[in-house]
Amino acid sequence: MDVTAEITANVWQVRTEVGATVAEGDELVILESMKMEIPVESPIDGTVTQVHVKPDDQVTEGDLVVTIEPS
């Protein structure tokens, strides 16, 4: 399952890595926009297969952030 950015923002923190087991609601990435922190949470339980961003990247709405294989 592809997880995308909901807003245009800068990537502040990446809180997961390839191979990590995640649960629905876990924070994957923290975005920063206008000095506000916006968490990108896992929509499902699964395993992270790809992380498409790194800190200081800029993303726009709909950009791919993380890919998760459902468990």
Image (spheres, rainbow, N blue to C red):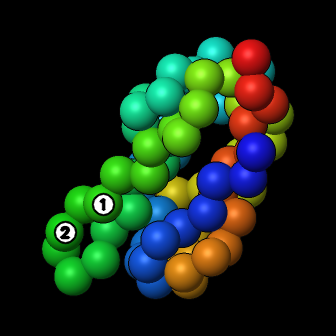
The quadrant of the picture occupied by the N terminus is: top right
Q: Residue at x 47, y 71 (%)?
A: 6
Instruction: Please tell me the numbered disc located at residue 38.
Output: 1
* Residue type, label 1: Ile
Q: Which residue is mark 2?
A: 36
The answer to whether the residues at label 1 and label 2 have Cβ atoms under 8 Å apart is yes
> Label 2 crowding class (10 Å Cα cut-off): few <14, some 14-19, many 20+?
few
> Label 1 crowding class (10 Å Cα cut-off): few <14, some 14-19, many 20+?
some
* Numbered disc total: 2
The residues bearing labels 1 and 2 have C-alpha atoms spaced at a distance of 6 Å
Image coords of residue 35 (percent x, y): 18, 74
Q: Note whether 52 is above or below 20 in the view shown.
A: below
Q: Residue at x 70, y 64 (%)?
A: 64
**58 left or right of 18?**
left
Q: Residue at x 75, y 27 (%)?
A: 70
Local SS, label 2? strand
Let me know if residue 20 appears in the view. Answer: no
Q: Note whether 6 is above or below 1 in the view shown.
A: below
Q: Residue at x 74, y 17 (%)?
A: 71
